[in-house]
Amino acid sequence: CIIRDNYAVSQWGYGDGGGIMLSGNSSPVIEFNQITGNTSDSGGGIAVLGTSYPVINHNLIENNTASQTGGGIMVGATAEATIASNIIRNNTTTSTSVFGGGGIALWNHVCSLGPCMDVYNNLIYGNETGTNGGGIYSRYNSSNLFNNTVWGNTAAAGGGVYVLNQGQETPIFTNSIIRNNSAASGPQIAVSGSAEFSFCNIEGGWSGTGEN
């Protein structure tokens, strides 16, 4: 399917999912779609809300825009998702004051027992935000992120990856490439709290097991 040029914008900032919005307890498989040119306040391409748990794989998610968070994909607090083998490129969040996540924004406050989402085999490049996390924005989220390429994204902080937590919800990054991103603060990675990086290829290096 082609899901293109749709809008979900509210004057109060509550427009979610320009292309696709999931809420309640929905758990669809979203695959082999082109999701492009959509606009919302959060989740320009896809917004996952409520207690939804979709599988999002083998999609082209490009040129979507969110004013607040998740230009390509936003997974909200209490929701979960498997995000695999997608091309997530040239998405944007336009705010210069709140949140971020040009490519993907992961929000989840309830995964204190371990990783609650798998994000893997994605190509995340050319995304942009005026705030935090050009490629990936992880906020109080303990996802397992592996085998991803995060390349050529732009932000004010955390050009490739931005992590915010209080040390309790620690995302785990494994076997991923994080390079050629740009930001005034933390061109590749910016962490406020804790994050684990293992066997990743990170431009400029990073402390962790097997890091390069």
Image: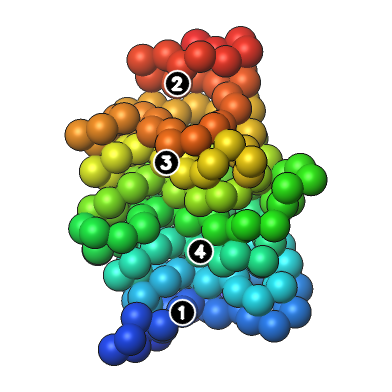
Pointer 1: what residue? 16
Q: Residue furthest right?
A: 113
State the mark number for residue 202: 2
The amino acid beneath tag 2 is Ile
CA gap between label 3 and label 2 equals 14 Å
Specify which label sits upstream in the sequence, 3 or 2: 3
CA gap between label 3 and label 4 equals 14 Å
Residues 197 and 71: in front is 197
Query: Residue at coordinates 50% horizontally, 19% vertically from top-left?
Result: 201
- Labels 4 and 1 touching (C-beta < 8 A): yes
Residue 10 vertical position relative to residue 131 in the rendered view, above or below: below
Pointer 3: what residue? 162
The amino acid beneath tag 4 is Met
CA gap between label 4 and label 1 equals 9 Å
CA gap between label 1 and label 3 equals 22 Å
Q: Nearer the viewer, mark 1 or mark 3?
A: 3
